[in-house]
Image (cartoon, helix red, strand yellow):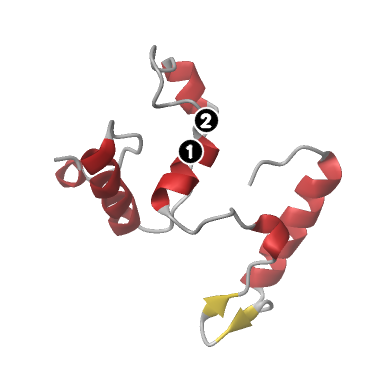
C-alpha cells in the first residue's frame, strides 16, 4: 500500500493495531479492507507496486531499495518470494539466511 497522506497512515496504523488485538480476523485469516488491497493477489503485483520500474534499465540505485521494502514475518516467506522473482528476473529481496539465495 502506498500511503499518500498522514490521515491514511494513521488509519492504516490503527487498523494494524486492531489486527494485533484480534479484530478483523476470521478463522485465523485477516480480513483486509479493499482500500488496503492490490488489484491482483500475486507476487509480481506486489513487487511491481513496491518497486515501480525495477525491471527497466538502468536498474535503480541501492538508495532506491533502502526506501522501498516488503515486510515479512518469516524468512521462509522471503525465500518463497525470492524463488518466484528468480524465475522472472532479478532477486529483489534479501533474507537473513544465505540458503534462501540460489
Q: How many marks?
A: 2
60 sits left or right of 80 in the view = right
> In this orientation, which residue lies closer to the viewer: 102 or 14?
102
Residue under the image location 44 percent in, 53 percent down: 72
How far across and how far down the image is residue 61, in percent?
43, 14
> In this orientation, which residue lies closer to the viewer: 76 or 90?
90
In the image as oriented, which residue stretches furthest toward the right? 7
Give the SS element for disc 2: loop
41 sits left or right of 84 in the view = right
Residue under the image location 67 percent in, 57 percent down: 36
Residue under the image location 49 percent in, 32 percent down: 51
Give the SS element for disc 1: helix
- Quarter-of-image position of residue 30: bottom right
Q: CA distance from mark 2 to mark 1?
A: 5 Å
Residue under the image location 72 percent in, 55 percent down: 13
14 sits left or right of 7 in the view = left
Q: Is residue 82 above or below residue 31?
A: above
How far across and how far down the image is residue 78, in percent?
33, 50
Q: Which residue is mark 1?
A: 48
How far across and how far down the image is residue 73, in percent?
43, 58
Local crowd size for mark 2, using a 10 Å CA cut-off: few (<14), some (14–19), many (≥20): few
Q: Quadrant of the C terminus?
A: top left
Identify the mark at residue 52; answer none if there is no mark: 2
Q: Are marks 2 and 1 in contact (CB under 8 Å)?
A: yes
Q: Is residue 20 above or below residue 25?
A: above
In the image as oriented, which residue stretches furthest toward the bottom? 27
> In this orientation, which residue lies closer to the viewer: 13 or 60?
60
- Quarter-of-image position of residue 14: bottom right
Local crowd size for mark 1, using a 10 Å CA cut-off: few (<14), some (14–19), many (≥20): few
In the image as oriented, which residue stretches furthest toward the top? 58
Amino acid at each position: 500500500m502506498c500511503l499518500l497522506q498522514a490521515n491514511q497512515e494513521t488509519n492504516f496504523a490503527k487498523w494494524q493495531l486492531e489486527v494485533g488485538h484480534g479484530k478483523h480476523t476470521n478463522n485465523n485469516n485477516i480480513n483486509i479492507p479493499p482500500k488496503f488491497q492490490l488489484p491482483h493477489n500475486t507476487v509480481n503485483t506486489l513487487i511491481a507496486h513496491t518497486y515501480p520500474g525495477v525491471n527497466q534499465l538502468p536498474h535503480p540505485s541501492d538508495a532506491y531499495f533502502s526506501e522501498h521494502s516488503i515486510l515479512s514475518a518469516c524468512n521462509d516467506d522471503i525465500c518463497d518470494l525470492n524463488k518466484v522473482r528468480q524465475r522472472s528476473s532479478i532477486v529483489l529481496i534479501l533474507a537473513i539466511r544465505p540458503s534462501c539465495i540460489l
